[in-house]
Amino acid sequence: MKHIISTSALLILSSISTEARAQNTVEVGIIQNADVTVVQKLLHPKAGRLEYGAHLVVMPFDTYTFTPATAITVAHHFREDLGVEGVLMAGYGMKSASYKELESPPYGVAPDAYGFLGSTMMDFQWSPIYAKMNVAGKRIYHHDVFITAGVGATIEQAIQPDATKTISPTFGTSVGFRVFTGKDYAFRFQLRDDLLLQERAKTANIRGTFLKQNVSIMIGISKLSGK
């Protein structure tokens, strides 16, 4: 009998305790997207830090030249989404297959093309997206997407034997992304489009101003400085 009474008392106390806990529960409802501004702490913050980068570059889209190059970048990030970056690029514009075909005996034409030698740019950088992705269900990578726009100068040299050099004012834009690999390093991919206001000596010795487009692919590694 005492065992039955004890069991009944425990059941009653448990019921009272459960009701008390239920009464203390607060219903918060559904969180709206507008109420969420930060979903996680950034694993790789950029604000207030310098970023140093080294890149391999190729310009494969010009009709008359093919250009391998290298680039060094140094950026200062004022905020997570805003910074300024200097770009120093050097390369060598070579004759493309199309150019060699045109200057061969069947055609005998040497286009007045100029090959890339180097450029210096100062860009503003906007990084509106920071996110993370799951690769093959095994590893999480943090990454961001950035857009740049800036001005600078480009030096190029004529492919023809006179090898005339010209320095051109340049306006450049690009879009790219970083994939952070840990220890403040990141893999960078960037598609860059530079517009040159180029003055050149034409074949008939008539000087003219041309709008030339250099489209390049940049792949490299960068490192963020200490916080």
Image: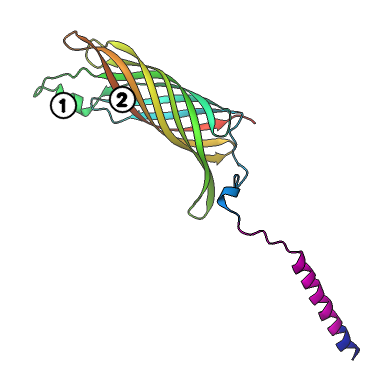
- Which amino acid does the dot numbered 1 rest on? Glu
Q: Nearer the viewer, residue 90 or 23?
A: 23
Q: Residues within 10 Å of mark 2 (few under 14, many from 20)?
A: some
Question: Who's the residue at 81% across and 80% down the image?
Answer: 11
Residue 178 highlighted magenta (yes or no)? no
From the viewer's perspective, is 99 left or right of 2? left
Task: Quickly name the residue at label 1.
Answer: 101
Q: In the rendered structure, find residue 213 and report the number of the disc placed on it.
A: 2
Q: Residue 173: where, in percent of width, then height? A: 40, 28
Q: Secondary structure at mark 1?
A: helix
Q: Residue 12: where, in percent of width, then height? A: 83, 80
Q: Which residue is the extreme one toward the right?
A: 2
Q: Secondary structure at mark 2?
A: strand
Occupied quadrant, residue 41? top right
- Which amino acid does the dot numbered 2 rest on? Gln
Q: Nearer the viewer, residue 96 or 168?
A: 168
Scheme of colours in the image: rainbow
Q: Nearer the viewer, mark 2 or mark 1?
A: 2
From the viewer's perspective, is 95 left or right of 13? left
Question: Who's the residue at 77% across and 72% down the image?
Answer: 19
Decide: marks 2, 1 in contact (CB < 8 A)? no
Residue 29 highlighted magenta (yes or no)? yes
Q: CA distance from mark 2 to mark 1?
A: 22 Å
The image shows residue 46, relative to residue 165, as above or below, that is below
The image shows residue 95, relative to residue 14, as above or below, that is above
Question: Who's the residue at 88% across and 84% down the image?
Answer: 6
Magenta segment, which residues?
7-30
Q: Residues within 10 Å of mark 1 (few under 14, many from 20)?
A: some
Dominant SS type (magenta): helix
